[in-house]
Amino acid sequence: MSSGIPSRRRSLGNTGETISAIALGTWGIRNENNAFITLVRGVELGLDTIDTAEMYNSGRAEELVGRVIKQVGRESVFLITKMLPERLKSRHEVIKYARAALRRLSVNEVDLYLIHWPNPTLSIQEQIKNFEVLIDEGLTRYIGVSNFNDVELVEAINSTKKSDIVLNQVHYSVLRKEVEETLLPTALKYQVTIQAYTPLERGGVLSHPRLAEISSKINKPIVQIALNYVIREPYLATVVKTENTKHLEEIAQTLEWCLTPELIEVLKKL
């Protein structure tokens, strides 16, 4: 394990701003009361980036996040939400659905708005042109994308007129590394943050024999090893969802140590 003091923050593109290395997710919430308690506790622990989307529980996840923000204070949270790609057909639609999301979130603007995945019926250029109106209207501070591959990401970057694409949220874990082939190098080249979702493979990392072996060798939980892998660089962050405060505490402790370069190389070969 590295002897350096680990950073709890990650760069947000080249904005000069940072987000918490581990963000709190809101996809697939089963018990809203437990989720509320856990999200509030997460912010208290310094995991102050909350990720949601209009499609999560048909808008209820955004409403829940709105209640969390009311509890902890708007200035305490870096807020990310995502827009469904079918909304991108016109600027008018983009504004209409963003305003509806902001009402559910009970905020005037979000910090970062993402296109949830590319709309296959529109050019990337048109999608970005329509989406950028959110900056003009003061509905978000930054824009980004989710589930864009390397070619789509470069196209999105080249399509912006006045704002940068600061982040791409993608499925990435120590067991699922396709993004390392071309997307990750491309994102790093353009200083776009990669935020990994499903980093624990819905518990799948826990049954991996090699991870169990490493865990017992360095005396750290598998969950923390898996999370530290996907946040190992300044432009790498992740989103983790839990409704269990005990699990949350274990997740937060990930930020108290780092993987050694040697261990990172071992994990890259998993």
Image: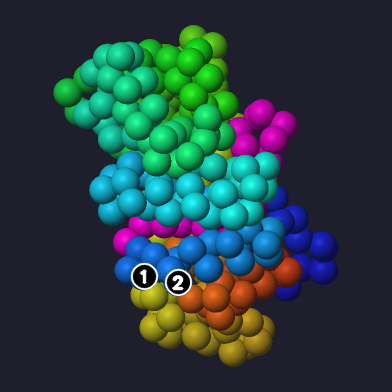
Q: Quadrant of residue 105?
A: top left
Q: Secondary structure at mark 2?
A: helix
Q: Residue at x 35, y 32 (%)?
A: 100
Numbered label tally: 2
Q: Amino acid at mark 1?
A: Asn
Mark 2 lies on residue: 34
How many other residues sit within 10 Å of disc 2, few (<14), some (14-19) or many (≥20)?
A: some
Q: Which residues are magenta?
A: 10-28
Residue type at the position of mark 2: Asn
Colour approach in the figure:
rainbow
Residue pictured at 54% horizontal, 42% vertical = 79
26 part of magenta stretch: yes
Residue 17 x %, y %: 69, 35
- Please tell me whether residue 14 is drawn above or below residue 184 in the rendered image: above
Above or below for 110 versus 204: above
Give the number of the disc on residue 31.
Answer: 1
Residues tagged 1 and 2 counted as in contact (Cβ below 8 A): yes
Q: CA distance from mark 1 to mark 2?
A: 5 Å
28 w.r.t. 85: above or below: below
Query: Please, which residue is most extreme toward the top here?
Result: 161
Q: Residue at x 24, y 18 (%)?
A: 89
